[in-house]
Amino acid sequence: MNATVRRLLLISALLASAALAWLPQLDALATERVDAGLKRALITFATARTLNAVISTLQETTLSVQPLGVGVTVAPGQMLDPINDLIEQFSTLMLAASVSFGVQKVLISVGGHAWVSAVLTLTALGVSGLLWRGQVLPRFAGAALIGLLVLRFSVPLSLLGSDLAFKQLLAEDYQSSQQGIANTAGELGRQAAAANPSGAAAAQQSTLDRLKRAATLPDVRAYAERMQEAANRAVSDLIRLIVSFLMQTLVFPLLLMWLMLRLAKSALSLDDRQRIW
């Protein structure tokens, strides 16, 4: 492809970009997807905090056993301390993901402002005029044009691209992991309630209920094994959720922005004499 054809294609692309800059549909669709991502992050954050509260309750629960007639008090919930630390770090990550979605929403609003579209349109028309006349383009013209294109289109396009990649590659893992965390929180919550009923619930227990509870609590090993199994499942689900949100909020957007920047730099290079970047 010779320089003349590339110049005409570039002029067409610049004029199309100037027209697209005024269309609100792109921003509306991107805002809709960022709201959906923010909702997912907040739901996951709330689920993680619920699991954190349940584990904290289990850590404070003690069981009294009497092997060979000797009274012993044990706290099997303390084995959950490492996963509780992981959940706290995960909650911090979910809060950061929520902030990231919020920042992206603000950037969409900034990039979609009428002043940005107006300046981009004028710059694109000016560069197109210089290209049409075959004049040598100043270096600052290419830098300004790329900066405006990035400001106007990079966030919504990268967000839509990362959302599409999330749906195709990560949505199923996210749903199963999110449901797994909720199920683990419910299971551990039932164990906490059975091991340490509230004062009102304990007062309402019949003598038979208390005898049944006394017969099951001494099996500390089985109780601890159930907690460990639930904790192992939670760790696996948390790791998959961390990967999902890091890919959607960091890896995919940065990769797409880099590709768009490289494409823009390549497109704005005509030949050695008229290179504008």
Image: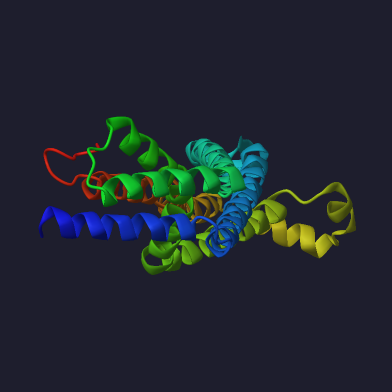
Residue 55 falls in image quadrant: top right
Q: Along the horizontal axis of the image, is 190 left or right of 126? A: right
238 lies above or below 169: above
The foreground one among 112 and 117 is: 117
Across and down, in percent, residue 133 comes to 26, 48
Quadrant placement of the N terminus: bottom left
The foreground one among 106 and 203 is: 106
The foreground one among 215 and 13 is: 13
Q: What residue is shown at x 57% (from left), y 41% (from top)?
A: 103
Residue positioned most to the front: 133
Q: What residue is shown at x 63% (from left), y 60% (from top)?
A: 186
Across and down, in percent, residue 7 comes to 22, 54
Q: Is residue 100 visible?
A: yes
Q: What residue is shown at x 17% (from left), y 47% (from top)?
A: 270
Across and down, in percent, residue 59 comes to 61, 39
Q: Along the horizontal axis of the image, is 263 left or right of 216? A: left
Across and down, in percent, residue 185 comes to 61, 55
Q: Along the horizontal axis of the image, is 261 left or right of 217? A: left
Number of marks present in the image shown = 0
The foreground one among 83 and 15 is: 15
Q: What residue is shown at x 59% (from left), y 57% (from top)?
A: 31
Quadrant placement of the C terminus: top left
100 lies above or below 233: above
* Applied colour scheme: rainbow
Q: Is residue 76 visible?
A: no
